[in-house]
Amino acid sequence: MTEATIGLENVTFGYLGNVVIENLSFSIQQGDFVAITGENGAAKTTAMKLLLGLLKPWKGTRLWPVNLNVSYVPQQISSIEQDFPSTVFEFIVSGSWKSKKWYERITKEDKERAKKLIDVFELQNVVDRPIGKLSGGQKQKACVARAFMSQPDMLLLDEPTTGMDEKMRNVFYETLKNMCPHVTIVIITHHIKELKPYIDQIIQLERRQDTCLN
């Protein structure tokens, strides 16, 4: 494995003494577009949290380069209240704060990058609309666009196509593919058949017989 490798090596993890992931190994090269898939209860979200370092393995090793800038869009992040007090543009440009000091302001360059991402994710027609008034699929796209504002090296997305129809999903996949190889993208999905043409690697997880977890 090269120095740039990201992944898990012989990782075992569980909850309340029950193993949900056992001897899991995979490696991801920078610039790849990777899908994590499996049936319900196969611990896909748990595997992603182990990769991020949000959970500590019982056994095994997490492989992670130094100084990797990461953005993470968790499951159901798009369930934003209807009265959330930001427009789509304000919501997306606020993603630049992740890469700033507390005293730094949003710059002209930040605003230009936000406008480009709005174009990329085809949100031009709703840019001045309150974020809470968008459809589920539009909120998902806005959340992912916001995650790109910090110019991450790696982006992890937990079921980001919830609320999108098939046509919107395929446009979304194409958009993500075009972001590689500048960004490593890992996505949890149930739509593996339609995603296959776009991805470099599939990580298939199996549900353990006595467990049923995300």
Image (cartoon, rainbow, N blue to C red):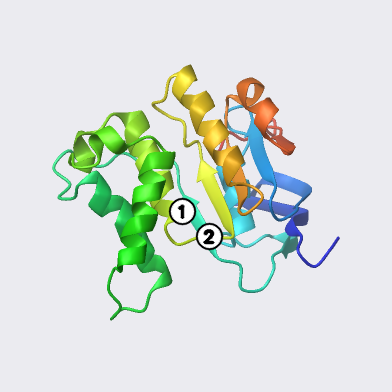
Q: Secondary structure at mark 1?
A: helix
Question: Which image quarter: residue 105?
Answer: bottom left
Q: Secondary structure at mark 2?
A: loop
Identify which amino acid the numbered label 1 is placed on: Phe
Residue visible at 65% across and 21% down in the picture: 193
Residue 38 in percent (x, y) is at 65, 30
Q: CA distance from mark 1 to mark 2?
A: 6 Å
Can you say whether 208 is above or below 29 in the image? above
Q: Which mark is residue 16?
A: none
Q: Residue furthest top?
A: 166
Do the CB atoms of the residues marked 1 and 2 lie less than 8 Å apart? yes
Which residue is under mark 1?
Answer: 148
Number of numbered discs present? 2
Left or right, 73 with respect to 54, comes to left
Q: Is residue 186 left or right of residue 204?
A: left
Instruction: State the residue at coordinates (43%, 45%).
Output: 144
Q: Nearer the viewer, residue 35 or 209?
A: 35
Q: Is residue 190 above or below residue 188?
A: above
Residue at the disc numbered 2: 152
Q: Quadrant of the N terminus?
A: bottom right
Residue 214 seen from this side: no
From this view, report whether residue 7 is shown above or below residue 179: below
Give the camera-side residue of 151 and 131. Answer: 151
Specify whether residue 149 is in view: yes
The amino acid marked with disc number 2 is Pro
| Number of other residues with Cα within 10 Å of mark 1, as a class: few under 14, some 14 to 19, many 20 or more | many
Give the image location of residue 155, x and y in percent. 55, 52
Other residues around mark 2 within 10 Å, as few (<14) / some (14–19) / many (≥20): some
